[in-house]
Amino acid sequence: MGDREMPGAGYRRCARAATAAAWLAALLLPLAAPAWAQEDDFEVEDFEIEEAAYGDEQRYRELTTLASEIELGVLYDFSNDERFGNYTGLLDDRPYLLGNLDLRQRGLFGGGDDVYGRLRGLNLGLDSRFVGAEIERQGHYGLLFEFDQLPVFQSETAQTFFLPGGDENLVLPTPWTPGATGAAMTQLPASLREIDIDWDRLRYSGGGFVELPADLSFDVRYDHEVKTGQKLVGAMMGISGGNPRSLVVPEPLDYVTQQLDAALRYGGEDLQLSLGYYGSAFNNRTSSLTWQNPYTAVAGAWDPSAGFDCGGAVVAGCGSGRKGVAPDNWFHQVLASGGYNLPRHTRVTLSGAFGWMLQDENFLPYSVNSALAAVTQAGLPTVGSDLAALPRSSLDAEIFTSVVDFHVTSRPVERLDVDLGYHFDNRDNETPRDVYVYIRGDAEDQSVDGLDSDQARINLPYSFTQHRVDVDAGYEVWRRTTVGLGYAWELTERDFQEVEELTEHSVRAILRSQPWSLLGTRLTYAHAWRTGDDYKGNLPFIQGHTAVPIEDALQACLNSGLVPTPECPFENHPLLRKSYLADLESDEVKFMLTLLPLEQLSVGLHLNWALEDYHDSEVGLTEASRLSPGVDFTWTPVERITTHAFYSWQQYRTEQNGWSFQGPTGANPNRPFQQIQDPTRRWSSRDTDDTHTAGFGFDYAVLPDRLSAGADYVFADSRGDIDFWVGSALSAGVPYPNSESQQHNVSVHTEYRFTESVSMRVGYLFAHFDWEDWAVDGIGPTSLTCGASACVIGSGRHSEDYVANVVSWSLVYRFW
Amino acid sequence: MRAAGAALALAVLLAASVAAEDAAEPDRSVLASAPAGGGDYATGGMDACLKCHDETEEYPVLSILATPHGVKADRRTPLASENACQSCHGPSAEHVRKEDDGEPRPPVAISFGPEASADVVDEVCLGCHQGGDRMHWAGSPHDLYNVACTSCHTIHAHEDPVLSKNVDPMRFTRDGQAKVCLTCHAEQRAQLQQRVSSHPLREGKLDCSGCHAPHGSVGPKLLNRPTLNETCYQCHAEKRGPFLWEHAPVREDCSICHTPHGSNHPTLLETRVPQLCQQCHMAEFHPSTAYTGPDFQTPALDFHALERGCLNCHTEVHGSNHPSGVRWTR
């Protein structure tokens, strides 16, 4: 296992404390239970059901009284594959405490008691534990407290040569010999160490409700979540002529997210109202990620001190890189809803949600390297580490969100249901627009050619407005058989994007029928067509630059005489159509059939198919399709045995076209304009993902009320193929390998009941996951392209398989 | 806009027309107060039913006594009413009166079995439960597909499975809520088995209702927040921004790049990087280059498609707040 530098130790202690508290309660409550129960000591006569037959008092009690349960035992994980611990917490080859408890109490029926209490503890011995407590007086008030822990484990094979403990400041080992390539960094191989890429989410929640007079109620919930660990990120030193120098490094995660959700509700017979508030605050306790540059200096656009060896200039912190991290942000939202019942089964609902997103984190300076001399042109502000060069010290970003939804459903005549809806979604981004300078790295030359240069960029605060109208009607044509027709119209308006208005129409037809309980079926078909305004591929480029570079690009394009005027200037290939903005025709079919040919047998069939045809897109995504047939069986051959089985195949396929082109050269300034029209530079890709999933299992009451057993098996096989074609001007390269994953999972569980209250559970779990990912397998930290001008030092991780064998044994104490 | 206006006007007219009707038909919340089927209520409260439907019943009828519906101290519950079981099952005097002479009894007024009409079932339940999260049930996808409340909810159970949080690392097939939902949503069940990347539903650490509001919602796809992105931000608030350098599709809709129920690619991506990025980015030099598979015969492998692909450098694809983060590299 690799080293871990993970903040949040205090929260881990809280997790342990929550677990301990749950266990303390578990130990005390059974002791208290007899006393608790004494007041309502189980007497059949206590029930008001005086004339009911009480043939089986135990059965009667089991039916009418909530049981509490404490399970205590041991899990032994014989695997040592940490990837298996993702979401489960079963990380190591060692025993774990198996602890679950569920303590419940509700007053006996007719006793006049409306108090309900519950304490749950799940997976208490694992890092996936949950503890929840709730108590309420039904119809009056209630309180809720929860603790939930989620371990996320991504990799145990990633490597880094940065020293441990650096957290947001990654420090190179000493001594360190910088190099233009990984091979030249002589200390690199010996300095590599494995790190775990994982994080924990610890969520603490509290809430409650109170029923108020006049059919009013109020509920509130507060969540406080801490996420700590580390993830992999790209850490780029800079770019020289389009060639990057980058590293894949661990970035610490230390997030705190708080959420508050509260609503006042009115629940009348015909009128229901709610008025709520939702707030969310995100706090990143890491402000940036800084790393020492392992590379040597590069001449040219790079500052001489861009390498770790600062060229003999002994200055602290020279040649470091830095990147921003997720900034603190807030979201406030007011939600209001109302629903009213009218005659003719008519209901009207109107809802609105009005929100405000905020972010005002202080900007980082252009460079972390204070020693870098700011080289500017006359009249321009100094950049480098001088924040005054920025148009503002923080963004003061805000987005106003509005969602309005109006619906009327009605049955104007017998058998006919009508539904009309209007939906409005607006995200009004009011973030101020300013000119910023694009300096490619903290250790690059910090000079600015001018605010009228290509370095000057204007931020694009995207706004979005969508109107949608739905009309649906369904008519019952025969015995529980309904035919429905629907139509939807949608208009989407966007700022700063290639298409300002996009209109979509869709029609749908639905047949649903369940004439008898042994047969149920549903068939839906939908067709949609989407068209937009003229696709202005250069609009984001024009709106994101200042006047001079736009004019320069325009003139270069026009001067070539090769590109139609409307397409000049361009950044992306003029024939590109971004898929979510492109004209589209789509079809979708969904079919489901449920059969009960025998009382003991049910069969389900489903088939989903969808096709998206981007018919006007010559470059970009041209087609996407999904296909998913499947079958399910549930069979109860005898009363004590139930079995189930399923199979499903899913295929997702995308087809896209590309057009490779290069920038101008001194000798050939028209090269991009020539190449965007050269069909031999085209390429195509078809990505197909196929997944087969199957499973079966059974539950068997071997000895009713004494011994039960069950087993499940799930198999999944996924395969991703990429078929690639390139034009004759391009290098054919080598075919993409398949990306494959396969899993077999077996679980067996038995329970033997010694007495009414005490039972034993034994379980076994086998999990095998085999994953082949060509993007990382066989690729070490220094396997990637690395030369004097371009280099990426990777993490060396590989796709992680696991084989897990877990056995469990536990005793269960059940009481009422 | 004209279509929207026309539809809105039509909707208002429809609402107004039905509002003008004399409210002569049964109230939606009928059963606690008035017969729905025109029959009589049997007297005797719950005893009348439990003479036959006792603990020997194969279906655990009596379990309702240990549920919120069985709390007599709460005057709102059906069993607190003098009509007791008939509060939901409707006036069933004929069913109760029938002598046990071997002939089948007339059924109760309202049965909740597989033969039951979703309209009738839903009307019974919504009579009391139309507020709160159920406010948007009418016209919601489940309503339009005739899904009855009892298709998902089990009333006569100590713990309704669809409301149950079940975390058992020793089982690969989930009990509780996910099992109920995935009975119909078989495509999602298969996606959740993806181990390359998936949300932790299979491990019981997230339930369908963590993202979805099955009774109807203002948001798309029955999501429990008004928009898809706001739903995702509940757990991924660090991606909310707003950022200085926004990535347009990220601001608009996470599902343009991600598929939430499971993927054969890392981080729930729809397609592999760099192909996914190249669906929208086709500029000169490296964004438009035709990247092919790793050639292990060469001394250096192309980093554009390997390791993290485009994200080896463009690591802040969800948005950057660095003043020079226009290309999401900083």
Image (tube, grey):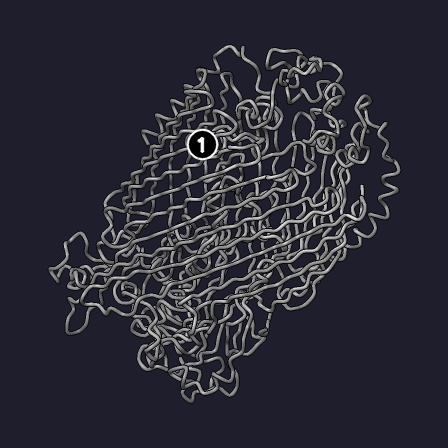
Q: Residue at x 75, y 30 (%)?
A: B55
Tell me residue A411's x, y (percent). 46, 19
Q: Where A714 falls versus B130 (above or below)?
A: below
The chain holding disc 1 is: A
Q: Quadrant of the image for the N terminus of chain B?
A: top left
Q: Where B85 falls versus A183 (above or below)?
A: above
Tell me residue B190's x, y (percent). 48, 49
Location of mark 1 (residue): A521
Q: Is residue B207 visible?
A: yes
Q: Which sits in the foreground, A161 or B151?
A: B151
Q: Quadrant of the image for the C terminus of chain B?
A: bottom left
Q: Residue at x 51, y 36 (%)?
A: B217
Tell me residue A418's x, y (percent). 42, 23
Q: Where B40 falls versus A457 (above or below)?
A: above
Of the residues shown, which amino acid type is indicated by label 1? Thr
Q: Residue furthest left?
A: A561
Q: Is residue B236 visible?
A: no
Tell me residue B132's x, y (percent). 59, 32
Crowding around mark 1 (Cα neighbors within 10 Å: few <14, some 14 to 19, many 20+) is: some
Would you identify the image quadrant in which residue A372 lies?
bottom left
Secondary element type, mark 1: strand
Would you identify the image quadrant in which residue B213 lies?
top right
